[in-house]
Amino acid sequence: MKEKIQEQFKQRFGTDGVVYASAGRINLIGEHTDYNGGFVFPGAIDKYIMAVININGTDKVRVYSMDMDAYCEFGLKEEDAPQEQWARYIFGVCREIIKRGGTVNGFDTVFAGNVPLGAGLSSSAALESCFAFALNDLFNENKIDKFELAKIGQSTEHNYCGVNCGIMDQFASVFGKKDCLMRLDCRSLEHAYFPFHPEGYKLVLLNSKIKHELVDSPYNKRRESCERVAATLGLDTLRDASYTMLADVRDKVSDEDYRRARFVIGEKQRVLDVCDALERGDYETVGRCMYETHDGLSRDYEVSCEELDYLNDVARECGVTGSRIMGGGFGGCTINLVKEDRYDNFIATAKEKFNAKYGHEPEVINVIISDGAHKVID
Ligand code: ADP
Ligand code: MG
């Protein structure tokens, strides 16, 4: 990819530039925990957005997207926002840096990527983080700290792309480290690295390519359930709740709210259990926790769907170590931890059975936990 974008850059702008990259991400475990003050456990992956950039001495940004085969030019004032969605991610990052008192002047850039779009791997965070990191390096002597870079990406989504996201995706993309997952405490924003190099296993996503459109905003309903139970317990969030405390208010909350809270309390503990297991190199326990998360998401939290439950069943049948729905739910990918000797059979079986039932094969996305935002040096 590096040669490809460098060549294109030279053709268009007649010079060389500096190359930067940032990654998409997976979340191994810790779902629907962010708004409950719990933990998430993401890692950056070997799928990137990569950009060549050169300061051009003007007040204009000139961008060519190789994947969209589209060119865009914009100024750096608020009223200069481009129409193209893909360019707004870059414009937003520039603006958010400037709003924070940082410097961005005109630059030329060519970028490309291989993070699948809209598959739940956060290609948009990879794009934002790549430019946030690069513009910090090129114009701000790296004075903006990494957490602020993640927030610049998040604010870009909020203010320029109409997506009201949390901090996990940009955090993972900026902080990602090879062979490490990161536990992020969504309450305190403290984070810690844990080793993840599952020798003898593969990490593979199966993208169902299904997205159920839902009418009654199920996310808000889940949030409201959690808030009601927390309030009943006299807590701000379910972070400090336990199964015992929940049992004590069993008859004060609805059955549905009870099950929602039961999932959240279990999920917080599972992230901690997985962290302990990884410090021992115990990937079997990691896998068991992944299945428990899937069951919780499916039965208690009720954010799965038939197709994702089916992929999870196939994983169990094929002796996959761990498998669960990844992301908010109602479609998207499963994330699977598979012993190498079971991998071929699992993939073939999942493709065949899913296709027979739903008329198309799931997309297979192998991932390796890799570095997040960085300057690409030869
Ligand atoms: P995701 O879950 O992958 O983040 P989003 O809808 O949030 O999905 O972001 C996808 C958008 O990000 C694309 O529509 C496009 O505007 C931008 N984007 C991502 N990758 C690329 C790329 N390689 N080239 C150009 N734009 C990209
Ligand atoms: Mg996104």
Image (tube, grey):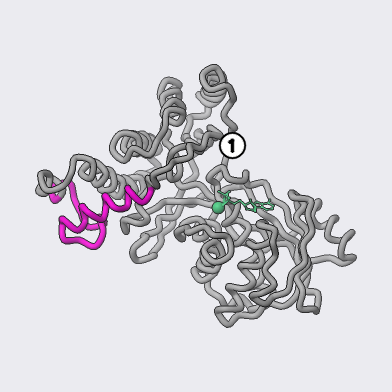
Q: Position of 157 compared to 127: left or right?
A: left
The picture places residue 5, in percent across and down from the top left corner, at 79, 55
Q: Main secondary structure of the magenta part?
A: helix
The picture places residue 288, in percent across and down from the top left corner, at 35, 34
Please tell me which residue lies in front, 366 or 104.
104
Q: Position of 325 compared to 269: left or right?
A: right
Q: Is residue 228 magenta?
A: yes
At 79% across and 51% down in the image, what residue appears?
A: 69
At 83% across and 60% down in the image, what residue appears?
A: 9
Q: Is residue 141 magenta?
A: no
Say if 346 sits above or below 135 in the image. Answer: above
Q: How many marks?
A: 1
Q: Residue furthest bottom?
A: 101
Give amino acid for label 1: Ile
Badge 1 local density, few (<14 within 10 Å), some, or many (20+)?
A: some
Please tell me which residue lies in front, 319 or 243.
243
Say which residue label 1 marks. Answer: 365
Give, as a single range, the part of the protein colored magenta: 219-245
Q: Position of 255 compared to 373: left or right?
A: left
Say if 186 sits above or below 200 in the image. Answer: below
The picture places residue 353, in percent across and down from the top left corner, at 52, 18
At 59% across and 25% down in the image, what residue appears?
A: 361
Quadrant, the C terminus:
bottom right
The picture places residue 178, in percent across and down from the top left corner, at 55, 52
* Whether the residue under disc 1 has CB within 8 Å of ligand 1: no
Is residue 31 shown to the viewer in this render? no
Is residue 131 shown to the viewer in this render? yes
Secondary structure under the numbered disc 1 in the rendered image: strand
